[in-house]
């Protein structure tokens, strides 16, 4: 069993995203990204099979998809998609997200 303390990864860099690898195993990977207000995690996709989730743990913004489609994202909201589907995030306020990728690549 493993306990993660997200309060210890609450760090922001002005103008750039901060990344913390929380867990990595053959079954899944968990990453905490902290985006300062106005920062965008660019829309991208991966040429592999699997799924991912993006959970907002602080702040608000938008989940981004293909053709700049935007879905409002607030604390407690989670996006689930195939890894091959375009995905990204735009922070309106300082925003913290936890991304789970299964299987990891």
Image (tube, rainbow, N blue to C red):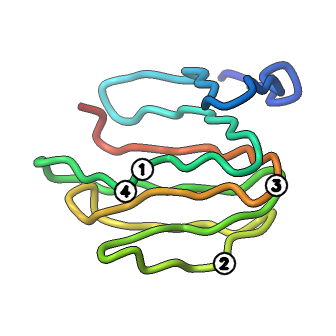
Q: Which residue is mark 3?
A: 93
Give the spatial CA distance, label 2 vs label 3: 12 Å
Q: Which residue is mark 4?
A: 43
Give the spatial CA distance, label 3 vs label 1: 16 Å
Give the spatial CA distance, label 4 vs label 1: 4 Å
Q: Which residue is mark 1?
A: 42
Identity of the residue drawn at 54% across and 21% down: 21
Q: Is residue 49 left or right of residue 69?
A: left
Q: Quadrant of residue 60?
A: bottom right
Identity of the residue drawn at 57% across and 80% down: 71
Give the spatial CA distance, label 2 vs label 4: 15 Å
Q: Which residue is mark 2?
A: 72
Disc with the residue nearer the chain's start (3 vs 4): 4
User: Which is more toward the observer, 90 or 102?
Assistant: 90
The answer to whether mark 4 and mark 1 are in CB contact below 8 A is: yes
The answer to whether mark 2 and mark 4 are in CB contact below 8 A is: no
**Image coords of residue 83 (percent x, y):** 27, 55
Give the quadrant of the N terminus: top right
Disc with the residue nearer the chain's start (1 vs 2): 1
The local crowd at label 2, few if under 14, some if 14 to 19, many if 20 or more residues have their Cα within 10 Å, is few
**Image coords of residue 90 (percent x, y):** 59, 58
> Which residue reaches farthest right?
7
The answer to whether mark 3 and mark 4 are in CB contact below 8 A is: no
């Amino acid at each position: 069993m493993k306990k993660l303390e997200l309060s210890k990864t609450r760090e922001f860099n002005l103008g750039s995203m901060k990344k913390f690898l929380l867990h990595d195993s053959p079954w899944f990977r968990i990453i905490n990204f902290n985006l300062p207000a106005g920062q965008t995690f660019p829309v991208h996709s991966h040429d592999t099979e699997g799924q991912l989730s993006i959970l907002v743990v602080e702040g608000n913004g938008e989940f981004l998809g293909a053709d700049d489609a935007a879905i409002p994202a607030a604390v407690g909201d989670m996006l689930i998609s195939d890894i091959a589907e375009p995905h990204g995030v735009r922070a309106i306020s300082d925003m913290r997200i936890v991304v789970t990728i299964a299987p990891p690549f």
